[in-house]
Image (cartoon, grey):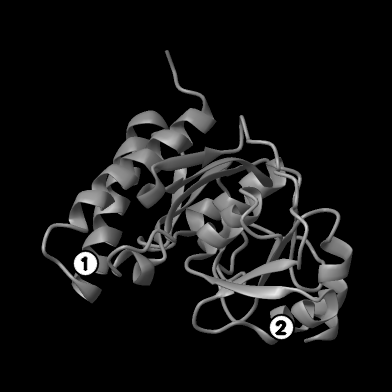
């Protein structure tokens, strides 16, 4: 029986996770470990997609871009290892694997694996959004370069910044109820956000650019440099503060 698209996405993400985890205890460190992980995860995902969806185009961080995707009906947008730095740091769990399908002009299904937690999140079925606990608004930001816009959101909402690793992990942290919003600026590519954004949308979260405009995928320019993911009850406040802080 042919797998559904969401099952293919989940299987590809799991295949990458299965390839990535043993490498962390295989004696490699730092850049060498990250490079080996990128390559192993790319091979695992490409093998699965080639077997299950041979006619589709794959648009991956770890492969040369091709103009074929701009006229293709079905494009898989893939980040085989999102958060190479965190993956290479022993004991960290805040890295991810992204597999999303774009068709009909938008993202339609996706899977994000959090291999160190043993989890694969998908667009269908998506877990219900947890209730927000009492307390300050929690805003996920980069561990190394929290943007000025996020700091402005924290001031405007009496919130707190929560440093985390990869873009996929931070987006899924909003889905999982670990934080309430994720605000990013300063550089990003389509593969960094496609799969986690698809899951966030399925969960009912607001996803957009910092100026409130839509996130557009499979565009000719792979750059998609900023991102907001927020709980719906907070989205207007988060976006207004982010725009004011630019």
Q: Is 106 in front, or is 144? A: 144
Counting every numbered tag in the picture gives 2
Q: Is 67 in front, or is 188? A: 188
Which mark is nearer the camera, 2 or 1?
Answer: 2
Q: Residues within 10 Å of mark 1 (few under 14, many from 20)?
A: many
Q: Would residue 201 be found to the left or right of residue 68 on screen?
A: right
Q: Residues within 10 Å of mark 2 (few under 14, many from 20)?
A: some
Q: Which residue is drawn at 11% across and 64% down?
A: 27
Q: In which quarter of the image is the N terminus?
A: top left
Q: Where is residue 172 in the image (x, y as percent from the top left)?
A: 58, 53
Q: Mark 2 points at which residue?
A: 151
Q: Where is residue 26 in the image (x, y as percent from the top left)?
A: 12, 58
Point out the residue furthest to the front here: 134
Q: Quadrant of the C terminus?
A: bottom right
Q: Would residue 63 be found to the left or right of residue 155 on screen?
A: left
Q: Mark 1 points at which residue?
A: 33
Q: Where is residue 167 in the image (x, y as percent from the top left)?
A: 53, 64
Regarding residue 46, the answer to whether it shows in the image is no
Q: Residue at x 85, y 84 (%)?
A: 244
Check if mark 2's residue and mark 1's residue have beta carbons within 8 Å. no
Q: Which residue is drawn at 80% across and 86% down?
A: 245
Location of residue 29 by image quarter: bottom left
SS class, disc 1: helix
Location of residue 151 by image quarter: bottom right
Regarding residue 242, the answer to whether it shows in the image is yes
Point out the residue furthest to the top here: 1
Tell me which label, 2 or 1, sits earlier in the chain.
Answer: 1
Q: Would residue 19 be found to the left or right of residue 179 on screen?
A: left
Q: Where is residue 132 in the image (x, y as percent from the top left)?
A: 75, 52
Point out the residue furthest to the left here: 27
Q: Gap between marks 2 and 1, in whole Å?
A: 33 Å
Image disc number at residue 24: none
């Amino acid at each position: 029986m042919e797998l559904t698209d969401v099952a293919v996405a989940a299987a590809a993400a799991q295949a990458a996770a299965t390839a990535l985890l043993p490498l962390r205890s295989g004696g490699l460190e730092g850049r060498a470990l990250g490079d080996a992980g990128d390559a192993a995860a790319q091979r695992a995902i490409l093998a699965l997609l080639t077997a299950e969806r041979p006619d589709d185009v794959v648009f991956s961080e770890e492969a040369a871009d091709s103009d074929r995707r701009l006229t293709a009906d079905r494009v898989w947008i893939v980040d085989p290892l999102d958060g190479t730095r965190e993956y290479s740091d022993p004991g960290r769990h805040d890295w991810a694997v992204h597999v999303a399908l774009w068709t009909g002009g938008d993202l339609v299904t996706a899977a994000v694996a959090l291999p160190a937690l043993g989890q694969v999140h998908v667009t269908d079925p998506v877990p219900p959004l947890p209730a927000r606990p009492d307390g300050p608004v929690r805003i996920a930001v980069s561990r190394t370069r929290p943007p000025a816009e996020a700091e402005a959101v924290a001031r405007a909402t009496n919130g707190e910044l929560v440093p985390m690793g990869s873009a996929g992990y931070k987006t899924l942290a909003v889905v999982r109820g670990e934080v309430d919003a994720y605000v990013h600026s300063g550089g990003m590519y389509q593969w960094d956000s496609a799969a986690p954004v698809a899951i966030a949308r399925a969960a009912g979260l607001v996803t957009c650019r910092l100026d409130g405009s839509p996130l557009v995928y499979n565009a000719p320019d792979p750059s998609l440099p900023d991102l907001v993911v927020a709980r719906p009850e907070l989205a207007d406040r988060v976006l207004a503060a982010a725009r004011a802080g630019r």
